[in-house]
Image (cartoon, helix red, strand yellow):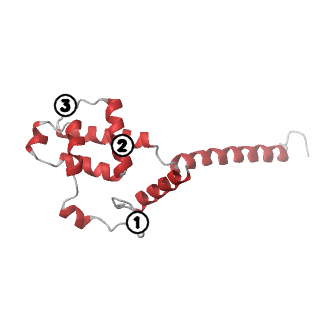
């Protein structure tokens, strides 16, 4: 090799090292994308979802939210119903026109008091896909993704 020419082997080693670092970075990104949200993250999303619906209903105002208390209530609700059904019930709540709910200005405390009444009506039931095959959960799972999460949680609980 003549002097002044790059050492090809040294350049190759540097490129390989960068390739390894890039692969590690891509693996981290993939892990973050594939990671399932924690129950606390799901509860936070549910609270934010409620907040967004409330602000749409009452522009330029903010609901009274007790962060720790309401997060705990959403955590329990998500454990019982799942994140998708909880979101569906929030959406149904804001489409109700019951006098009690309207007079309470769609408050969070009334939502939690009325959550068992926020079942899908017949028109919702016609638009919902059948539960995943083999689902024995109560209430039945509404999607394959929900069924996978609940089955995994059941297995984890059984391993304790």
Q: Are marks 3 and 1 in contact (CB under 8 Å)?
A: no
Q: SS of the residue at dot 1? A: loop
Q: Label 2 neighbourhood size at 10 Å, few (<14), some (14-19), many (20+)?
A: some
Q: Position of residue 89 (x, y in %)?
A: 25, 50
Looking at the image, is mark 3 or mark 1 earlier in the sequence? 3
* Residue to which mark 3 is pinned: 60
Viewer-nearest residue: 94 or 52: 94
Residue at position x 41%, y 57% in the image: 146
Viewer-nearest residue: 59 or 115: 115
Q: Position of residue 36 (x, y in %)?
A: 49, 48
Q: Is residue 130 above or below residue 32?
A: below
CA distance for labels 3 and 2: 30 Å
Q: SS of the residue at dot 2? A: helix
Residue at position x 21%, y 42% in the image: 113
* Residue to which mark 1 is pinned: 135
Q: SS of the residue at dot 3? A: loop
Q: Label 1 neighbourhood size at 10 Å, few (<14), some (14-19), many (20+)?
A: some
Looking at the image, is mark 3 or mark 2 earlier in the sequence? 3
Q: Nearer the viewer, mark 3 or mark 2?
A: 2
Tell me where residue 49 sits by quadrant: top left
Q: Label 3 neighbourhood size at 10 Å, few (<14), some (14-19), many (20+)?
A: few
| Residue occupying the far left of the picture | 99
CA distance for labels 3 and 1: 44 Å
* Drawn side of residue 12 relative to residue 88, left or right: right
Q: Nearer the viewer, mark 3 or mark 1?
A: 1
* Residue to which mark 2 is pinned: 76
Viewer-nearest residue: 100 or 16: 100
Q: Is residue 16 visible?
A: yes
* Drawn side of residue 34 relative to residue 17, left or right: left
């Amino acid at each position: 090799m003549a002097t002044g020419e790059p050492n090809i082997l040294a350049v190759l080693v540097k490129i390989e090292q960068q390739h390894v670092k890039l692969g590690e970075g891509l693996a981290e990104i993939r892990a973050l994308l594939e990671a399932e949200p924690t129950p606390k993250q799901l509860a936070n999303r549910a609270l934010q979802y409620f907040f967004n619906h409330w602000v749409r209903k009452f522009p330029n105002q903010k609901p009274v939210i007790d962060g720790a208390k309401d997060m705990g209530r959403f955590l329990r609700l998500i454990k019982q119903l799942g994140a998708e059904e909880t979101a569906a019930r929030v959406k149904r709540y804001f489409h109700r026109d019951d006098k009690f709910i309207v007079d309470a200005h769609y408050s969070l405390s009334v939502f939690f008091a009325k959550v068992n009444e926020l079942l899908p009506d017949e028109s919702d039931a016609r638009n919902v896909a059948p539960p995943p095959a083999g689902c024995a959960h109560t209430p039945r799972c509404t999607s394959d993704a929900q069924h996978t999460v609940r089955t995994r949680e059941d297995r984890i609980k059984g391993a304790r």
